[in-house]
Amino acid sequence: MKKSKIAIASDHAGREMKEELKSFLQSMGVEVVDMGVNDDKSVDYPDYGIPLAQRVSNGDVPRGVLVCGTGIGMSILANKFKGVRAALVSDVYTARMAKEHNDANILVIGGRIVGKGLAREMLKTWIEATFEGGRHQTRLDKITELEKKCHK
């Protein structure tokens, strides 16, 4: 498995899961950039999702993981950024497809939706999966063209 740098962030509802996944990534030898949150005080998820999505969009980090209560808010937010392909996953199959078919560069998990064991398994699957290219690249190229029109 290729070792790399992954940024991770959450809101208060996802903090416990973020800490779990951060430790799991470190145990795999992945360099982790923890972008908060670091306590359970209620926060607005955009305050933590925006900086991470910006770093992925700018190419400062190749991949990221976002966690909030359901994952929905972080997913919507991250996909506003040019070049970001954030995938909200809830099982191992969608985690693998997020990478193999969609080349997702941000994995989004609902900290109140899935258990820690499943979250670790999804994360590992996503990291180890490889983008298949081919017809899937053609589809991503169409999305990239749309982004160019929308982000003028």
Image: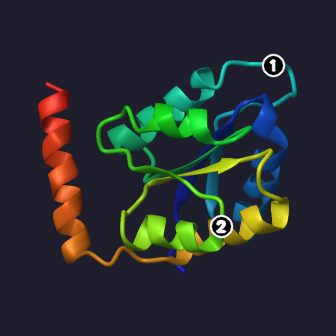
Residue plotted at (56% across, 54% down): 6
In the rendered structure, which amino acid carries the disc numbered 1? Ser
Disc count in the image? 2
Q: Nearer the viewer, residue 132 or 93?
A: 93
Residue plotted at (43% across, 53% down): 62
Secondary structure at badge 2 equals loop
Q: Percent from the top left, x then y, of residue 105?
A: 44, 55
88 lies above or below 40: below
Side (left or right) of 37 relative to 54: right
One can see residue 104 in this view: yes
Residue plotted at (64% across, 35% down): 35
Side (left or right) of 105 relative to 108: left
Residue plotted at (65% across, 39% down): 9
One can see residue 29 in this view: no
Circle 1 or circle 2, nearest the eye: 2
Secondary structure at badge 1 equals loop
Q: Nearer the viewer, residue 120 or 139?
A: 139
Q: Which mark is residue 42?
A: 1
Q: Percent from the top left, x then y, of residue 17?
A: 80, 48
Other residues around mark 1 within 10 Å, as few (<14) / some (14–19) / many (≥20):
few
Q: Which residue is mark 2?
A: 91
Q: CA distance from mark 1 to mark 2?
A: 27 Å
Q: Quadrant of residue 128?
A: bottom right
